[in-house]
């Protein structure tokens, strides 16, 4: 499709640019003047065309004769020449020997400038390295705080560990005591219920009961939401001036869209859920189990433990056996101050100890003692 806009881009109006003479410092020379009117210096690689403050269009008649191609630089004398000249007007060298045009020169010059600035910047950075000391200080204080925190944490952990770690105490054995128990079990009938019937149970009855709940869609509800979207409101002309590289600027007009936010509503069907009970058969049954009904206990304050001998009824049996052996011992807590404590021990070690004997006991956090062998 042939469009008006493109036509305008192709045939933009021309504006004559300006340049500054690098040799004599003459400024705002009209670009059509290829040599400085004051010193005669020609346009060269230092020439950069720029737009005048007030826009004045070149007549259509004149514009038709002006080439839209960039100037070429004479490789011999360095001056800029119009595209339509085949011989340098300054020295007579041919266009074929030319190596760069205006844009290529500008690109190389910009690159040079950029590199120079980079060098300057790194130099500045190197000399200003002492400046960010404050930041470093801050970092250091943060580190200090972190270390302090870690230190406190370590002390706490160490403290907890040493509390839990077994302690060795030099004690004098004062006394012994012990306790032995045997559970007495009897078959008892229990009434229970479950979702399954155990093999050895006697079923009483069943009942349909709620076992769990399931989420199901009850119905759908229309939900209307207000949303926004970006749409094109209208087009605006955007005018720009393009450097042709021959001293002239071409005016280009581009149509650009201007956007706005538009609100609209959207209606969707959203499901509404409900909790639906799930029923299952529950079994109510009786079951016989060996159950602890009593505990026979024997205890003494000597080193001769004996198991209790419970009198069992016909429907009874003995269950779990349990035994505990203790020593009461005295140790020096501080200078001249003694403390007496009771510790549990294993039968084999407990049996070996003698009243009045001095020994090292290793005692753990739960108060259980072992004879220290280290
Ligand atoms: Zn000059
Ligand atoms: Zn030349």
Image (tube, helix red, strand yellow):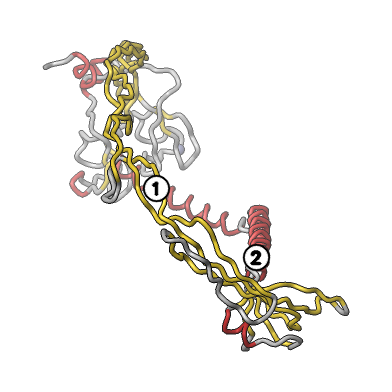
The answer to whether residue 14 is visible is no
Which quadrant is the C terminus positioned in?
Answer: bottom right
Residue at label 2? Answer: 160
Query: Looking at the picture, how far across and down is residue 43, in whole percent?
Result: 36, 39
- Name which quarter of the figure residue 87 lies in: top left
Query: For the view shown, which residue lies furthest in the left direction?
Result: 1
Query: Looking at the picture, how far across and down is residue 309, in whole percent?
Result: 53, 71
CA gap between label 1 and label 2 equals: 48 Å
Horizontal placement of 6 versus 189: left or right? left
Q: Nearer the viewer, residue 144 or 149?
A: 149
- Assign ligand 1 to one image quadrant: top left
Query: Looking at the picture, how far across and down is residue 49, in whole percent?
Result: 38, 33
Task: Respond yes or no on whether mark 2 lies under 8 Å from ligand 1.
Answer: no
Q: Residue at x 56, y 55 (%)?
A: 125
Q: Nearer the viewer, residue 350 or 244?
A: 350
Residue at label 1? Answer: 189
Which quadrant is the N terminus positioned in?
Answer: top left
Reply above or below: 47 against 141. above
Q: Residue at x 29, y 18 (%)?
A: 270
How many numbered discs sit on the rendered protein?
A: 2
Query: For the view shown, which residue lies furthest in the right direction?
Result: 336
The disc, 1 or 2, on the residue closer to the chain's N-terminal end is 2
Q: Nearer the viewer, residue 21 or 256?
A: 256
Q: Residue at x 47, y 52 (%)?
A: 118
């Amino acid at each position: 499709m042939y469009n008006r806009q493109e036509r305008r881009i192709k045939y933009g109006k021309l504006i004559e640019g300006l340049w500054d003479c690098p040799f004599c410092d003459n400024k705002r020379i009209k670009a059509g003047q290829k040599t400085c009117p004051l010193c005669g210096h020609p346009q060269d690689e230092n020439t950069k065309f720029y737009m005048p403050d007030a826009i004045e269009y070149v007549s259509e008649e004149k514009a038709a004769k002006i080439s839209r191609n960039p100037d070429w630089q004479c490789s011999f004398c360095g001056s800029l020449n119009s595209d339509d000249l085949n011989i340098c007007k300054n020295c007579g060298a041919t266009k074929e020997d030319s190596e760069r045009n205006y844009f290529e020169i500008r690109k190389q010059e910009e690159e040079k400038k950029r590199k120079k600035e980079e060098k300057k910047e790194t130099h500045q950075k190197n000399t200003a390295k002492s400046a960010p000391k404050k930041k470093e200080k801050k970092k250091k204080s943060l580190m200090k705080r972190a270390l302090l925190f870690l230190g406190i944490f370590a002390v706490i952990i160490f403290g907890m560990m040493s509390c839990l770690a077994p302690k060795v105490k030099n004690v004098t054995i004062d006394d012994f005591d012990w306790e032995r128990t045997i559970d007495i079990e009897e078959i008892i009938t229990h009434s229970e219920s479950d979702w399954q019937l155990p093999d050895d149970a006697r079923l009483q009855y069943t009942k349909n009961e709620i076992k769990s709940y399931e989420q199901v869609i009850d119905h759908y509800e229309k939900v209307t939401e207000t949303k926004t979207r970006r749409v094109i409101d209208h087009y605006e002309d955007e005018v720009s001036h393009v450097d042709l590289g021959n001293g002239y600027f071409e005016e280009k007009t581009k149509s650009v869209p201007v956007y706005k936010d538009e609100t609209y509503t959207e209606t969707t069907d959203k499901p509404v859920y409900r909790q639906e009970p799930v029923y299952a058969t529950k079994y109510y049954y009786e079951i016989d189990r060996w159950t602890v009904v009593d505990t026979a206990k024997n205890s003494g304050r000597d080193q001769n433990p004996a198991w209790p001998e419970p009198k069992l009824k016909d429907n009874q049996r003995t269950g779990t056996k349990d035994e505990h052996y203790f020593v009461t011992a005295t140790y020096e807590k501080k200078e001249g101050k003694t403390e007496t404590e009771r510790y549990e021990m294993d039968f084999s070690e407990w049996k070996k100890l003698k009243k009045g004997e001095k020994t090292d006991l290793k005692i753990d956090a739960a108060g259980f003692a072992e004879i220290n062998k280290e």
